Amino acid sequence: MAGSRPQQLPRASKRSEKGRVCAHEGCPTVISQYNKREKCWAHAEMKIPRLRGRNPAPAEG
Ligand SMILES: [Zn+2]
């Protein structure tokens, strides 16, 4: 289009534009906008398959 005037795009002032933080309270993990999950991988309700079938690692500390 000819004679297109440059429009001043508003600066991204909203913080929820590009990304958002984990829904878990106190979790600063930023989740990608493409990620439809509300929580990060650490807090998302997902079943993590156990690689170790037995002998759980001793809790240190
Ligand atoms: Zn999280």
Image (spheres, helix red, strand yellow):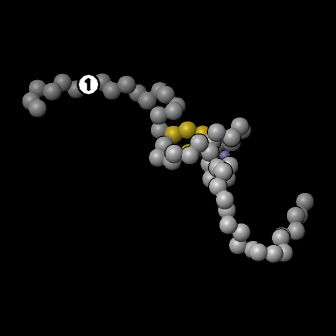
Q: Nearer the viewer, residue 55 or 4?
A: 55
| Residue sitting at the far right | 61
Q: Nearer the viewer, residue 37 or 18?
A: 37
Give the quadrant of residue 50: bottom right
Q: Is residue 59 above or below residue 24?
A: below
Q: Is residue 33 visible?
A: yes
| Residue sitting at the far left | 2
Tell whether 46 sits left or right of 6: right
Tell whether 61 sits left or right of 52: right
What residue is at 63 percent from the left and 42 percent from the top? 22
- Mark 1 sits near ligand 1, with its Cβ under 8 Å away: no
Residue 32 horizontal/vertical position (percent): 51, 46
Dot 1 falls on a residue whose secondary structure is loop
What residue is at 47 percent from the left and 34 percent from the top? 17
Tell whether 23 sits left or right of 16: right
Tell whether 19 sits left or right of 60: left
Residue 33 horizontal/vertical position (percent): 48, 43
* Residue identifier under label 1: 7
What residue is at 9 percent from the left and 30 percent from the top? 2
Residue 47 horizontal/vertical position (percent): 66, 59
Give the quadrant of residue 58: bottom right
Residue 41 horizontal/vertical position (percent): 62, 53
Q: Nearer the viewer, residue 7 or 45?
A: 45
Q: How many marks?
A: 1
For label 1, count other residues whose C-alpha is less than 10 Å away and answer few (under 14), some (14-19) or many (20+): few
Q: Is residue 32 visible?
A: no
Q: Nearer the viewer, residue 45 or 16?
A: 45
Q: Is residue 1 above or below residue 33?
A: above
Q: Amino acid at mark 1?
A: Gln
Q: Is residue 57 above or below residue 34?
A: below
In the rendered image, the quadrant that contains the N terminus is top left
In the rendered image, the quadrant that contains the C terminus is bottom right
